[in-house]
């Protein structure tokens, strides 16, 4: 008898042991999905994590009910990676699995059992009475049934065994919705209805269309596109109808009439979702001398260390250098992972990469449908071809065959950190681990490296390579600080814009150039308030003031999404005094619209980018100059590359700088320097206006001079003085409860017990910035752990306390979780 350890998507630590039924022993392998009974009469889908011959002591093991796969759906290093992640981020491997595997592979959702329409009972292998009962039940249902449901309805406790036998006999099948939902993409093509080089036929084709007509245009275009007359080309190139229409400037009706005349055939073909039909020139960008030197230095650095930081100013051509590195890796037959912090960035990047690498580019992120994600997963599972995978943070979980290189672009970005739910991982750090499991090299890139990364680079953990010149020696943009208090005094502020900023935007428009305006808040106004009594409407479930959205005319909670109508009279003083205060993207848009009534304006924030193609559409239309002003939240600060942007306005720098958090100043410096970096990329003629009421804040000085190093020195000294990362590691312990007193007491008790063991490494408990979300009160304990301390020891201590407190019922009703290396 063999036994299998199965990973289940439950928030309970560890794997679960099941016995493998005799008939299944040969078919079962590590990495396959199985359905197992769990708890009372419940079934779960899980993944086999190991197989061993030893029966666990002390309890009855149940049998695996069904094995869903004939081949594993994960690759060997993935399970190891999941374990690392669960260990490091103090969560369960089941939680990691849930984040890692696309929902379409049905790890949590249920698998359906349906009758096999082709089944005929075999006289030598009749169904047993129980099997017949189950069959009758299934056949009698209109809807598909899950194993769980069949078990409950028929009352058989060993339903897994029965269904397994029915499967063996071919009476039922497991219906994977996937197969049904899979829709392949079809493309429409056109070709001449006669073979190549037949000049007689071409002649008669021309005489069949009127000269100067649309059809003639299409005919000429098709000859060109297909290379019909080109020497040395045996078979004409395939041409899509779309290409033909674009090139000839005709409609589909024109193409259809030509088909009717018998000149051309229209045919459909299934295309690979991954194929790229645009122009692939396969040419690597030619690097400048300084870029070439940098590239060499990176290659050399990898002889010494596995991880290298490329600190290159904005628009220095980091992407160009990455392309060369990827090319090198692909030519060596290995795969490359290229991580970007924001989905918006994949759009421009994908185009740049596809021009060089064509079909070898694979994109992966959460805006893809489940179906598409499963497709990509399976593609990677079944190939070891050299590919470059471009993706947001969840792509670290893909089943790579053999990674040779991991690039983490904009490595400082907080978007790499998953906040909720567990695993609360940082994709940059996770990517480094994945790389090391594959023996791959890692390149971290940024114009504003995180304090931790730069510290590691300076102290020799990583190699450090600096690239301090913009492409073609372009100047970095000129930074202007606008003292808003002073400007207001002088009457030089209209709404939220100083005259300085307005004039800059205006002169850019005069020159035919573009502007980006960055405001850190979405919606219309971040606060509503009664102007008579000062009452502020808050969310019923969360401890936050509500943001007014003009588009929907609602007050919305940005923590739980609950919408509220705007009260006409103040609930506190019963007077009609509610007004909205402050600025969000919607209001900035409205104001810009009033200032520049003839301009069309683009806005990019969470509200305008909910659908899959929305990023692409906004970026595309802005690049094409359909609008000349782009307003946006932090989405516009990251890595976008536009040629004609010469002005950037940071509308409210203070909202970025003043945040009660030890990373606030780092985040502010990075965000403002990055958004500034969008300006003057092609003509070196950029200007940035930073509007602030706090012009003497130290980070403003460093920003003025683009002085990253000065800023770093300042910040690292603060971190050392106050004992923050990178000098210690931080773990937050979160406790949530629907009762405020209860959560205070629990947190106090937890901290007390922890303090006995860890002394002054324990800080708090305190209330986080937002102390109630979705009706739960929150308390937080901060642990500061020495860098060289053993995390597994800390983990054990935390677990012991949790068990003690659970056993003495102190924790009841509370939710407890950890955030390791919080951002
Ligand atoms: P970064 O990633 O460092 O911000 P990019 O790689 O986006 O910079 O380069 C900035 C701009 O300069 C891009 O538009 C890019 O096409 C151009 N560029 C940089 N290096 C080269 C090169 N060697 N040849 C042609 N264009 C380049
Ligand atoms: Zn809320």
Image: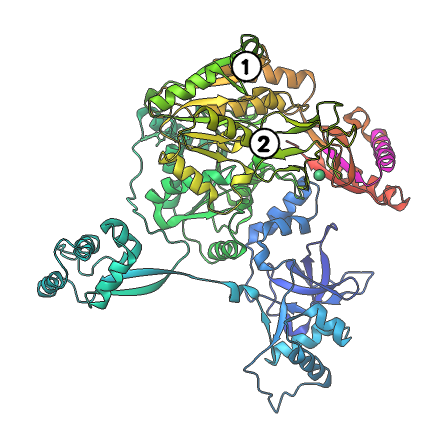
Disc 2 secondary structure class: loop
Does the stretch in magenta take in 175?
no
**Snapshot quadrant of residue 729:** top right
- Magenta region's main secondary structure? helix
The answer to whether 356 is drawn above or below residue 695 in the figure is below
Marks 2 and 1, how far apart in space? Answer: 27 Å
Which residue lies at the image location 68% right of the left edge and 41% below the top edge? 560
Q: Quadrant of the N terminus?
A: bottom right
Give x and y (percent) for residue 554: 64, 38
On screen, residue 124 versus residue 797, left or right, reads left
**Snapshot quadrant of residue 56:** bottom right
For the magenta stretch, what is the residue range? 732-755
Looking at the rendered structure, which numbered label has been put on residue 700? Answer: 1
The answer to whether 775 is drawn above or below residue 763 in the figure is below
Does the stretch in magenta take in 743?
yes
Way the structure is coloured = rainbow
Q: Residue 141: in sight, yes or no?
A: yes
**Snapshot quadrant of residue 801:** top right
Say whether disc 2 or disc 1 marks the residue closer to the N-terminus. 2
Give x and y (percent) for residue 575: 75, 28
The answer to whether 314 is drawn above or below residue 103 in the figure is above
Q: Quadrant of the C terminus?
A: top right
610 or 427, nearer to the observer: 610
Give x and y (percent) for residue 484: 56, 13
538 or 31, nearer to the observer: 538
Mark 2, residue position = 524
């Amino acid at each position: 008898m063999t036994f299998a350890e199965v990973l289940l998507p439950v928030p309970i630590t560890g794997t679960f042991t099941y016995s493998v039924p005799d008939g299944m022993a040969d078919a079962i392998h590590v990495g396959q999905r199985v359905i197992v009974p769990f708890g009372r009469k419940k079934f779960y889908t899980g993944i086999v994590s190991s197989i061993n011959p030893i029966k666990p002591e002390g309890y009855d093991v149940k049998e695996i009910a069904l094995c869903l796969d004939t081949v594993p759906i994960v690759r060997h290093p993935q399970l190891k990676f999941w374990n690392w992640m669960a260990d490091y981020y103090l969560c369960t491997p089941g939680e990691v699995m849930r984040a890692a595997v696309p929902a379409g592979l049905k790890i949590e959702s249920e698998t359906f059992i349906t009758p096999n329409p082709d089944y005929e009972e075999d006289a030598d292998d009749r169904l047993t009475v129980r099997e017949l009962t189950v069959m009758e039940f299934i056949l009698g249902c209109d809807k598909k049934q899950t194993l769980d449901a069949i078990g409950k309805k028929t009352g058989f406790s060993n339903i897994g065994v029965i269904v397994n036998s029915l499967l063996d006999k071919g009476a039922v099948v497991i219906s994977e919705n996937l197969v049904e939902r899979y829709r392949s993409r079809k493309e429409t093509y056109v070709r001449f209805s006669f073979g190549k080089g037949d000049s007689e036929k071409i002649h008669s084709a021309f005489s069949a269309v009127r000269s100067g007509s649309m059809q003639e245009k299409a005919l000429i275009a098709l000859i060109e596109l297909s290379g019909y007359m080109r020497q040395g080309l045996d078979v004409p190139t395939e041409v899509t109808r779309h290409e033909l229409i674009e090139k000839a400037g005709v409609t589909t009706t024109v193409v259809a009439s030509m088909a009717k005349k018998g000149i051309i055939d229209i045919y459909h073909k299934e295309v690979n979702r991954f194929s790229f039909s645009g122009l692939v020139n396969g040419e690597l960008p030619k690097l400048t001398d300084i870029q070439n030197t940098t590239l060499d230095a990176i290659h050399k650095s990898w002889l010494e260390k596995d991880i290298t930081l490329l600190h290159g100013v904005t628009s220095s051509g980091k992407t160009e250098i990455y392309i060369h590195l990827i090319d090198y890796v692909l030519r060596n037959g290995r795969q490359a992972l290229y991580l970007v912090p924001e989905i918006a960035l994949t759009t421009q990047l994908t185009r740049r990469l596809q021009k060089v690498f064509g079909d070898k580019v694979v994109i992966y992120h959460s805006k893809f449908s489940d179906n598409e994600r499963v497709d990509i997963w399976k593609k990677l599972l079944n190939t070891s071809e050299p590919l470059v995978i471009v993706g947001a943070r969840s792509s670290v979980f893909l089943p790579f065959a053999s990674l040779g290189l991991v690039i983490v672009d904009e490595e400082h970005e907080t978007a790499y950190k998953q906040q909720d739910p567990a695993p609360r991982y940082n994709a940059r750090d996770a990517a480094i681990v994945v790389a090391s499991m594959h023996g791959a090299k890692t390149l971290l890139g940024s114009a504003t490296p995180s304090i931790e990364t730069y510290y590691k680079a300076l102290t020799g953990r990583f190699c450090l390579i600096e690239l301090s010149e913009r492409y073609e020696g372009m100047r970095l943009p000129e930074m202007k600080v606008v003292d808003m208090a002073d400007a207001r005094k002088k009457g030089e502020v209209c709404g939220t814009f100083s005259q300085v900023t307005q004039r800059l935007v205006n002169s850019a428009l005069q020159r035919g150039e573009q502007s980006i305006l960055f405001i850190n808040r979405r919606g219309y106004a971040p606060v509503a308030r009664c102007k008579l009594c000062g009452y502020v409407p808050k969310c019923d479930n969360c401890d936050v003031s509500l943001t007014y959205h003009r588009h929907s005319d609602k007050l919305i909670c940005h923590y739980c999404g609950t919408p509220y109508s705007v009260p006409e009279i103040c609930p506190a003083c019963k007077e009609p005094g509610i007004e909205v205060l402050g600025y969000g993207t919607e209001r900035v848009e409205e104001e810009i619209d009033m200032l520049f009534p003839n301009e069309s304006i683009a806005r990019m924030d969470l509200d305008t980018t909910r659908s899959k193609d929305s990023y692409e559409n906004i970026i595309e239309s802005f690049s094409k100059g359909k609008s000349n002003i782009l307003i946006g939240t932090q989405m516009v600060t990251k890595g976008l590359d536009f040629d004609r942007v010469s002005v950037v306005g940071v509308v409210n720098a203070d909202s970025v700088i003043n945040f009660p958090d030890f990373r606030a100043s780092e985040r502010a410096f990075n965000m403002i320097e990055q958004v500034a970096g969008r300006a003057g990329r092609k003509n070196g003629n950029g200007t940035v206006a930073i509007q602030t009421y706090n012009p003497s804040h130290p980070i403003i000085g460093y920003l003025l001079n683009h002085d990253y190093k000065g800023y770093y020195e300042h910040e690292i000294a603060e971190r050392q003085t106050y004992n923050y990362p990178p000098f210690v590691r931080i773990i937050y312990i979160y406790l949530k409860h629907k009762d405020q007193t209860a959560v205070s007491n629990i947190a106090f008790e937890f901290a007390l017990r922890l303090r006995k063991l860890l002394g002054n490494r324990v800080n708090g408990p305190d209330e986080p910035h937002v102390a109630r979300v979705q009706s739960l009160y929150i308390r937080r304990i901060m642990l500061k752990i020495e860098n060289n301390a053993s995390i597994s020891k800390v983990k054990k201590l935390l677990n012991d306390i949790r068990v003690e407190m659970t056993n003495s019922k102190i924790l009841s009703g509370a939710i407890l979780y950890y955030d390791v290396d919080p951002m």
